[in-house]
């Protein structure tokens, strides 16, 4: 695991954890807009570290490494954390361990429930094959999926696949979908999802509300998994500032 820092170290700490199969650079639009207000700590998850081959281990191991880092560098206290997909799963595990203080947590399309055991392994290997195909045939895929959203995901695949291969994807999916969130501390929790993934998100939300009834739920119309970050980063910037009670820019511009 590796950590990238942006902004002044004396500012409030903002932790960013990326999703499966993407690099920390997926957060570049947020970093450029928020580094004046925060000390941004961006995680490079094992198996997806740019320019370095590494092996994904497990959700629990990734969470433990982040907890140790925050305890060592931030005295165990950060103002805000945002986790996308896999990053949200890791963040939920950090919350469950309850060994550091996070004032505001944003779980963006985080999978919190396991899949049936009979489905986990074929599903994970299928996803590994899909990513391998995207890496080797990205030019062809871009002809059929020409939106900014899909182009960004394909470009991330080209960057990150050599750093962990299909095995990182397979192990990542297996760890995600064999772990269930069992508890959560009393802190400020936000769960975001796109309406195009509502079929997946609703079960996660129902479970989360049984653990933390005051969770703030927000759906974003006509958006797919992770699309809010890719296509609407200014909206996330606005919401993070609002959640953290910082000076806001004009909402009409988002």
Image: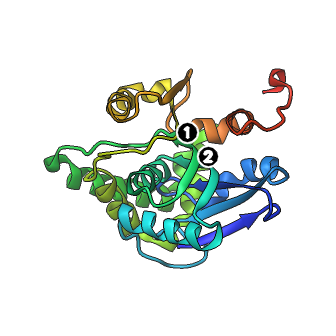
Q: Quadrant of the C terminus?
A: top right
- Between 121 and 207, the one lying in front of the other is 207
- Between 199 and 73, the one lying in front of the other is 73
Q: Residue at 78%, 48% (x, y): give it.
A: 34
x, y (%) of residue 23?
59, 61
x, y (%) of residue 240?
69, 39
x, y (%) of residue 146?
61, 38
Disc 1 + disc 2, Cβ < 8 Å: yes
Residue 148 visible in the shown view: no
Q: Residue at 51%, 59% (x, y): give it.
A: 100
Residue 10 visible in the shown view: yes
- Between 165 and 32, the one lying in front of the other is 32
Quarter of the image where one finds residue 248? top right
Q: Which residue is mark 2?
A: 151
Image-based side of 171 in relation to 27, left or right = left
Q: Nearer the viewer, mark 1 or mark 2?
A: 2
Query: Eyeballing the image, is 248 above or below 251?
Result: below
Secondary structure beneath label 1: loop
Q: Which residue is mark 1?
A: 145
What separation in Å lies between label 1 and label 2 (alpha carbons)? 7 Å
Q: Residue at 75%, 53% (x, y): give it.
A: 31
**Is the residue marked by circle 2 packed among few (<14), some (14-19), or many (20+) residues within 10 Å?**
some
Image-based side of 238 in relation to 26, left or right = right
x, y (%) of residue 201?
40, 31
Secondary structure beneath label 2: helix
């Amino acid at each position: 695991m590796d950590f990238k820092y942006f902004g002044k170290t004396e500012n409030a700490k903002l932790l960013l954890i990326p999703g499966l199969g993407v690099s920390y650079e997926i957060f570049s639009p947020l970093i450029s807009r928020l580094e004046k207000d925060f000390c941004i700590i961006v995680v490079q998850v094992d198996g997806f570290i740019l320019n370095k081959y590494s092996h994904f281990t497990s959700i629990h191991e990734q969470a433990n490494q982040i907890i140790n880092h925050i305890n060592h560098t931030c005295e165990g206290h950060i103002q805000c954390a945002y986790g996308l997909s896999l990053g949200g799963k890791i963040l939920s595990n950090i919350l469950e361990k309850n060994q550091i203080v996070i004032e505001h947590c944003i779980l963006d399309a985080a999978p919190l429930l396991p899949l049936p055991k009979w489905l986990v392994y074929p599903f994970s290997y299928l996803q590994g094959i899909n990513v391998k195909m995207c890496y080797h045939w990205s030019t062809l895929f871009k002809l059929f999926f020409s939106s900014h959203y899909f182009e960004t995901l394909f470009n991330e695949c080209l960057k990150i696949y050599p750093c962990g291969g299909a095995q990182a994807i397979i192990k990542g999916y297996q760890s995600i979908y064999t772990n269930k969130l069992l508890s959560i501390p009393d802190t400020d929790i936000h769960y975001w999802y796109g309406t195009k993934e509502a079929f997946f998100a609703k079960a996660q939300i129902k479970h989360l509300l049984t653990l933390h009834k005051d969770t703030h739920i927000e759906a974003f119309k006509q958006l797919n998994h992770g699309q809010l970050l890719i296509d609407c980063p200014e909206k996330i910037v606005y919401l993070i500032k609002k959640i953290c009670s910082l000076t806001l820019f004009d909402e009409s511009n988002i």
